[in-house]
Image: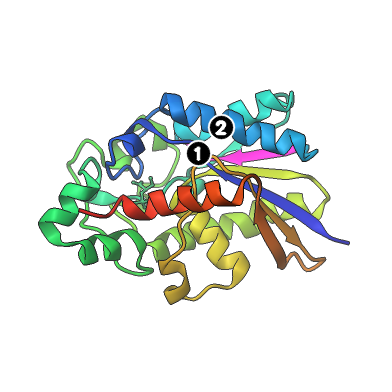
Amino acid sequence: MSYQLVMIRHGESLWNKENLFTGWTDVDLSENGINEANQGSILLKDAGFHFDVCYTSYLKRAIHTANYVLQGLDEEWIPMIKTWKLNERHYGALQGLNKSETAAKYGEEQVKIWRRSFDVCPPLLDQNDSRNPALQPMYQSVPSSELPLAESLKDTVARVIPYYEQCIRKDIQSGKKVLIAAHGNSLRALVMYLDGLSAEQILDLNIPTGVPLVYELNDQLQAVNHRYLGDEQLVKAKMQAVKNQGSK
Ligand SMILES: O=C(O)[C@@H](CO)OP(=O)(O)O
């Protein structure tokens, strides 16, 4: 018995377009991001994919991407489960700063550490900052002790993976076709776990926007292989573009 899991990072957001650290800031997709989500849907449709359930975050760029994908597949009726556990990594006080300007100010190496290291946490948001999730209606049902003021990838792994194991895994195991529409770093956390990557290996992993990533899992639900749908060169160029966001 083998299983399958499909992930998709949201299409380009308005803040991706402006090259701003985004994290839990709830921004819309750009025009290009909408096209990317629709394109992702076409790739899935052409390859014959169907879904029984979709998991996404609380953030509208991921929710809208899921909607565009499911609309294209004519499967908007399936259950869509929204959880803050799949939110983007919280970028703390870096949120809203331009990545290139931050690289010019603090150096590209420091920005790479903030963006891609496993266990370095960005500077924390102030408790009284209106962006503190504990002060926002969106997170009112979450105990404030669980809500971050910034997160490293390690912190993100610590919330994404237990959720995957407790909730998503069960659906996959019961034979449901699962789609996860999430974010660059919440998906890096999941890929790190599924592929058993080390802290060094994860440094150079960049997830492209709006491209379906298909995992084949064995009967133990271990990853046996994965592939992006679509043109290989285009996928590589999109990954490189994500990497370059941290250049001066
Ligand atoms: O700003 C962010 O929240 C993320 C994803 O867009 O960026 P990065 O690729 O720098 O981790």
- Which residues, given as a range, are shown in magenta? 51-58
Q: What residue type is labelled 1?
A: His
- Figure check: 36 above or below 206: above
Point out which mark residue 37 bears: 2
Q: Which residue lies furthest to the front in this view?
A: 233
Q: Which amino acid does label 2 sit on?
A: Ala
On residue 107, the disc is none
- Asked which secondary structure carries label 2, the reply is helix
Image-based side of 218 in relation to 140, left or right: right
Q: Which residue is drawn at 67% across and 51% down?
A: 168
Percent position of residue 181, x then y = 57, 41
Is residue 86 covered in magenta? no
Residue 56: image quadrant is top right
Mark 1 lies on residue: 10
Q: Look at discs 1 and 2 and give the one toward the viewer.
A: 2
Determine if the C-beta at disc 2 is less than 8 A from ligand 1: no
Look at the image and name its color scheme.
rainbow
- Among all residues in the image, which is located at the extreme left? 105
How far apart marks 1 and 2 lie (CA) works out to 7 Å
Q: What element carries label 1?
A: loop
Q: Do the residues labelled 1 and 2 touch (CB within 8 Å)?
A: yes
Residue 121 visible in this rendered orientation of the protein: no
Which one is in front, 55 or 73? Answer: 73
Residue 198, horizontal then vertical, whole percent:
49, 76
